[in-house]
Image (cartoon, rainbow, N blue to C red):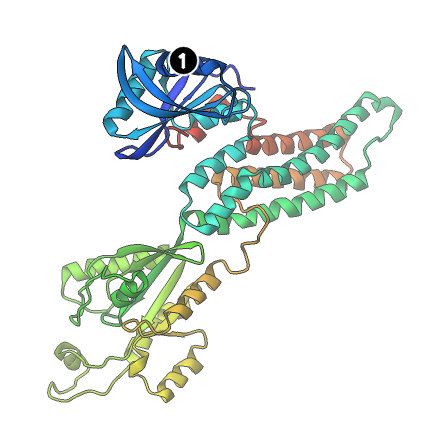
């Protein structure tokens, strides 16, 4: 399989653990010369005669110099990750020792591995298909339970099995239709068109479900952007600090303290949320820098998956605010949330993804709270300073984002390459159905089926090119 790729016969080596100093490091060698290189460097015993899947403790030497005492793991072809002879060396985590061992291995005939080359070789040797290989990179990059679940399901072949079932049934019908072409003069039908129509209809439903899952998959893979917006001093930065449980943003009673967006991530029930604290939005400001911050706040709103539109009662108005509302500076104004609500009401009306969050609820009377709840039934009431209501806010965010959509079993498409191929498959299936309804000839039906099979094969790697493989595996980390 793909054994004409350049460098196929090379023996490759790379550091498989993160670079830097640690307790131990792992160096991986794969290829036809792996055992011979191990025999030259591991002087404690002859590795090539040992059984596969065994561990060996001993000394590594190069040119008569002892480098380190290591643990060597031996995996013989074909029962290894790559399908080749593979040796893994666990050494002490000194950056100097890592470099010395790599230099010794390179001096004995190996070359540095390219990004993802170990997994590429696993794919080339049929240890996994292309969709499973891509899941390896997703698993390494997963930062949440949901991303881990999606990657594990794909790595175990769940996604590929769903496609393979469709592919095998279509292949059977394609073979029967093409057989009909050999008997075209006798006007016979080996492929039952009614059964094919039912099959294609069901396949279309499965493919559409996979395409629809990409929106959720993209959210799971990249996180959910949540913009915290509202007037100055409604407690946006206080909320961010409370969610992060640290003083991440500067909190001050001075309006316009936040001049730029601040982004932090939080894991809620296994899903990553990316909270963006924005500059307070107000219509008039003479501060050029603050205005830039407000403009960025509006851009953050447009890019967000969810908007937390915050409102809060104003306990003590600033002199500027008193002047703005025509109040005497010596007058003590009553607590007022109307202006704050009015500011975010426009956002709530124009953005379907917006959620009203009422902060500083300890300053509201029960009547005020009931009035707000009546006007905004979906509102979440919190007091960010004390943490009141934050648990409910987290639950509401999770419910808005993914609740009920992540199933214990079932593929979730997280890869843009996959969804592009699935869309082509869906078009091909629709063309097959249209052809059946118009009683299209067998040779033209066969063309549509072959096109569908082509795109199914593109996802799993049955149909691929060297350039496409280079592109896919170039995104992997070196050593995997």
- Crowd class of label 1 (few under 14; some 14 to 19; many from 20; radius 10 Å): some
Outermost residue, right side: 186
Where is residue 332? Give x, y as percent: 16, 88
> Above or below — where is 97 with respect to 237?
above
Residue at left 16%, top 81%?
A: 322
Q: Quadrant of the C terminus?
A: top left
Q: Is residue 445 above or below residue 162?
A: above
Give the image location of residue 219, x and y in percent.
45, 51
Q: Would residue 32 appear left or right of 61 to someone viewing this image?
A: right
Q: Which x, y percent locates residue 335?
A: 25, 85
Q: Position of residue 189 (x, y in %)?
A: 84, 31
- The part of the image, by quadrant, that contains residue 91 is top left
Between 80 and 245, which is closer to the camera in this rendering? 80
Q: Residue at x 53, y 31 (%)?
A: 130
Residue at position x 37%, y 32% in the image: 477
Which quadrant would the N terminus be assigned to in this image? top right
Q: Is residue 165 left or right of residue 11?
A: right
Residue bearing mark 1: 39
Q: Is residue 246 left or right of residue 38?
A: left
How many labels, in total? Answer: 1
Tell me what residue is drawn at x 38 percent, y 16 percent.
Answer: 44
The correct choice, above or below, for 221 with respect to 237 in the image is above
Q: Toward the viewer: 198 or 42?
A: 42
Is residue 113 something that shows in the picture?
A: no
- Where disc 1 sits, the SS reads helix
From this viewpoint, is residue 18 visible? yes
């Amino acid at each position: 399989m793909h054994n004409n790729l350049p460098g196929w016969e090379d023996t490759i080596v790379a550091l498989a653990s993160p670079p830097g100093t640690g307790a131990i490091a792992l160096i991986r060698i794969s290829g036809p010369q792996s055992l011979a290189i191990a025999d030259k460097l591991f002087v404690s015993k002859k590795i090539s005669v040992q059984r596969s899947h065994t561990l060996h403790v001993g000394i590594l030497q190069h040119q008569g110099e002892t480098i380190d005492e290591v643990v060597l793991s031996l995996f013989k072809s074909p029962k290894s990750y790559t399908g080749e002879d593979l040796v893994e060396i666990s050494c002490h985590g000194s950056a100097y020792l890592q470099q010395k061992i790599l230099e010794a291995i390179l001096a004995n005939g190996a070359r540095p591995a390219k990004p993802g080359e170990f997994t590429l070789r696993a794919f080339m040797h049929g240890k996994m298909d292309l969709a499973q290989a891509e899941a390896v990179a997703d698993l390494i990059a997963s930062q949440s339970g949901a991303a881990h679940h999606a990657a594990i399901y794909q790595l175990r072949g769940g996604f590929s099995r769903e496609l393979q079932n469709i592919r095998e049934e279509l292949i059977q019908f394609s073979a029967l239709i093409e057989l009909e072409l050999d008997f075209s003069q006798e006007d016979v039908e080996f492929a039952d068109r009614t059964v094919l129509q039912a099959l294609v209809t069901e396949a279309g439903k499965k493919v559409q479900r996979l395409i629809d899952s990409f929106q959720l998959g993209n959210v799971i893979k990249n996180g959910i952007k949540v913009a915290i917006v509202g007037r100055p001093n409604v407690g946006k930065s206080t909320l961010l600090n409370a969610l992060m449980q640290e003083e991440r943003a500067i909190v001050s009673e001075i309006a316009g303290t936040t001049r730029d967006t601040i982004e932090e991530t939080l894991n809620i029930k296994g899903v990553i949320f990316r909270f963006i604290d924005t500059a307070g939005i107000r219509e008039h400001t003479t501060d050029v820098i603050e205005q830039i911050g407000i403009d960025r706040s509006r851009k953050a709103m447009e890019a967000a998956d969810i908007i937390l539109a915050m409102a809060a009662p104003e306990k003590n108005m600033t002199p500027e605010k008193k002047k703005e509302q025509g109040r005497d500076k010596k007058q003590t104004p009553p607590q007022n949330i109307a202006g704050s609500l009015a500011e975010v009401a426009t956002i709530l009306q124009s953005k379907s993804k917006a959620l009203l969050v009422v902060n500083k609820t300890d300053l509201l009377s029960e009547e005020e709270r009931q009035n707000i709840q009546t006007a905004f039934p979906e509102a979440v009431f919190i007091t960010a300073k004390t943490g009141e209501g934050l648990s409910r806010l987290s639950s509401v965010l999770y419910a808005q984002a993914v609740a009920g959509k992540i199933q214990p079993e079932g593929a979730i498409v997280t890869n843009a390459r996959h969804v592009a191929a699935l869309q082509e498959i869906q078009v091909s299936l629709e063309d097959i159905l249209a052809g059946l309804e118009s009683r299209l000839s067998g040779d033209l039906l066969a063309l549509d089926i072959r096109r569908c099979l082509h795109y199914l094969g593109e996802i799993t790697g049955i149909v691929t090119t060297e350039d496409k493989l280079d592109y896919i595996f170039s995104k992997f980390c070196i050593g995997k």
